[in-house]
Each structure stands twice: as structure tokens, then as C-alpha cells.
Amino acid sequence: MTDSKQAISEPGEERPESPGAGAPGEHPGQAGANPPGEAGPNPPGEAGAPTPPTADGHQAHSDQPEAARPGEPPRADSTEIEGDLDELVRVAAQRDEYLALAQRTQADFENYRKRVARESALAKERGVAKLVKELLPALDNLDRALAAAAQDDPLLEGVRLVRSELSAALARVGVESFAPLGEKFDPVLHEAMATTPEPANGRDGGTIVEVYQPGYRLGEHIIRPARVVVAA
């Protein structure tokens, strides 16, 4: 029994085409058009789509900054570059100022070090000279004792040892004695105790002919001038 609502296709009978596929009235080029909701050509204004021309026919420019091309560094603003240059100039000037200050400080310290060393040496020399002046009378008395003692005196050797030790101690601190016999008289180094009317032994006038006491000096500093007799 055949149902009137159900269509049964018989072998060799053509099936009716589906609606929309080659429907009457459609153009051949519209058959592949994208239906609504599917991806199609980019609408105007989206990325990758050309900007539509304006009413006067010119191409509209976007307000967005142009992106850097691949491989190119980003473009720096000229104002930022000028600010960096000004900062570099300021830092260089500050560096030069600090360098000059450091050099002046180093020079001042070097001058201070030299001045302190010089003053310390002078103070040491003054202290040694003062001590030697206190010892000179004792040395003179030892010299007189050696000159007046008899050669067979048992104490003579002990006096010589004491005199020798004092002389060695003075030499260790830079003090030396001088007896300018036969030299030309120099008022800076010598003190004239007396004069002879005629030069002795054919010496010229102004020559030292006798030494009463030897002089002592510390470097260039005269602790005590030599006391001498000068030929007139």
C-alpha cells in the first residue's frame, strides 16, 4: 500500500535540485559569494584594508604613527635626543670640575707634606743643636784634662775613652767638629780671639795661625764657631 505523503523515488527518476543551487534568477558569479557571517574582504578602516578616499578625492592619512620597518631601530624623538645631549654636557662639566678639585687637593696635600717634613727636620736640628751646646763645655774640659795630664797617669786612658764615646755619639746625630788651622779667616765660621802683628811661618794676612777651641756644626748650621788667632 502506497502512502500519499511519502515520495518514493523510482530507479531512473531524477531528483529535484536543492533550493539555492542554481536557482532561477541567480547570476553565475554569485554562486561562490560568502554567506552572511563568514569571513570575507576586509571592511574599510580595518588593519590591512586601504583607507577610502575622502570627498575631495585625496587619500586620508591616519593619525597613528608610522610603525618602524622590520630591522630598523625605533625612531627617537628629537626633543629626547637634545635632552640626552644636554645631560651629557652637564655630566662632563661636573666631572671636569671634580677632577680639577681633586688635583688641587692633591697639590695642596703634597705641599703640606713637604712643609711638615721640612719643619720636622728643622725642629729636630734645633733640638740636637741645643743638646750639643749643653755638652760642649764638658767636651772642652775633657780636652783640657787630656792636654794637662801626665802620660803615665792611669786615668788618662779612661778620659780618652769618655772623650771618644762623646765624639762618636755626636757624629751619629750629624754633628762634626772642625779646627781650621791654616785656613783663611771667615767670620761666619770662625771667631777671632786675638791677632798677631806679623804672619807666622810666612803665612799671608788673615790666615788662622792658632785654634783655641774647635768649632762644631750640624749640616749647614754652625752650633759654635771655631775660636782662633788670626795673623794681621
Image (spheres, helix red, strand yellow):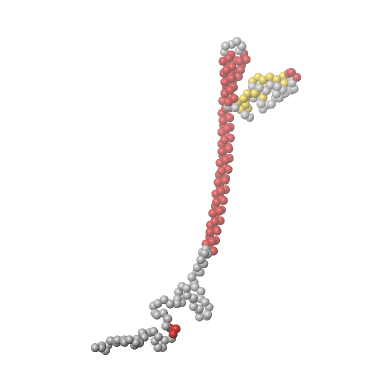
Q: Position of residue 40 (x, y in %)?
A: 43, 77
Q: Residue at x 58, y 43 (%)?
A: 107
Let me know if residue 34 appears in the view: yes
**Nearer-the-camera pick, 211 or 66:** 66
Q: Position of residue 12 (x, y in %)?
A: 34, 87
Q: In the image, is 218 to the left or to the right of 8?
A: right
* Relative to 200, 136 lies left or right: left
Looking at the image, the residue that sits furthest to the left is: 1
Question: Residue 78 is drawn in which quadrant?
Answer: bottom right
**Residue nearest the observer in this picture, 140 or 31:** 31
The residue most toward the top is 152
Above or below 171: residue 89: below
Q: Position of residue 73 (x, y in %)?
A: 52, 63
Quadrant holding the C terminus: top right
Q: Is residue 43 visible?
A: no
Corner quadrant of residue 191: top right
